[in-house]
Image (cartoon, helix red, strand yellow):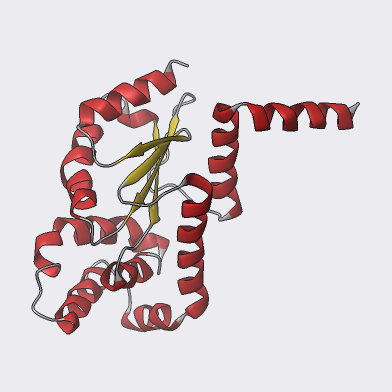
Amino acid sequence: MKIINLIIFLVALSTNPAISKIYEYKKYLEDNNIQPLVKSSEENSVDIIEFSSFSCSHCAAFHNETLKELKESSVYKNINFYLIDFPLNQAAFYGAIIANCSENVRTSYVDSVYENYDVWTKASSGEEIIELLNSYGLQHGLGDEELQSCLKDENSHNELLSLQVDAQNIFGVESTPTFLINGEKVQGNRPATEFIKIINKKLNN
């Protein structure tokens, strides 16, 4: 009986795109032990996954403008917000390494990198970019030894790249920002009102 039920479930999964999307994104989060930056305490909640590159101006606009509007909306309390690094160049990859050094500084580091986007992306040299990206971690409590250890940890670097490859293969992520809202792919930054409309639709399903 259990085998029959499993077969029925797998058939439904393969023939229903909506179920398949939900299964894939939840499995992706679970398999990679990805924790939300923001976790809702509400019984009815929506998962938002953002694939983001620190070098992306539209990602910066989302964090500095759109996300701030979402935080002021009535739906924000219902959001589980996940951020997955999808670096598009070497500087973004360097920043992603630091962002993943410690869960204790991740949120504040992400905020600082995007808030200072026009500063570090316009630095006069690669050395200055590195110095600025390092400083955002150090000012939020990341120790210098911990920072240097993260920068040398090839296993964590490979894990970041693996997440990016899986995002491309499973969800077709090719540009940033790309969002999965309960498995529904939304590409590019949008007005906060559009995100709120999608979120309300998911909450009412």
- The residue at 56%/56% (across/down) is 32
Residue 174 percent location from the top left of the image: 38, 52
Q: Which residue lies furthest to the top in this view?
A: 204
- Relative to 75, is 63 above or below? below
Q: For residue 49, which quarter of the picture?
A: top left
Instruction: Count all numbered tags in the image, as a single digit.
Output: 0
Q: Where is residue 101 in the image (x, y as percent from the top left)?
A: 40, 69
Vertically, is 199 above or below 148? above
Q: Quadrant of the N terminus?
A: top right
The front one of 203 and 28 is 28
35 with respect to 200 (left or right): right
Q: Residue at left 32%, top 55%?
A: 107
Can residue 41 be seen?
no
x and y percentages locating residue 166 in the rendered image:
52, 56
Residue 189: x and y in percent read 24, 41
- The one nearer the camera, 193 or 101, is 193
Left or right: 22 with respect to 124? right
Instruction: Name the one closer to the observer, 104 or 179.
Output: 179
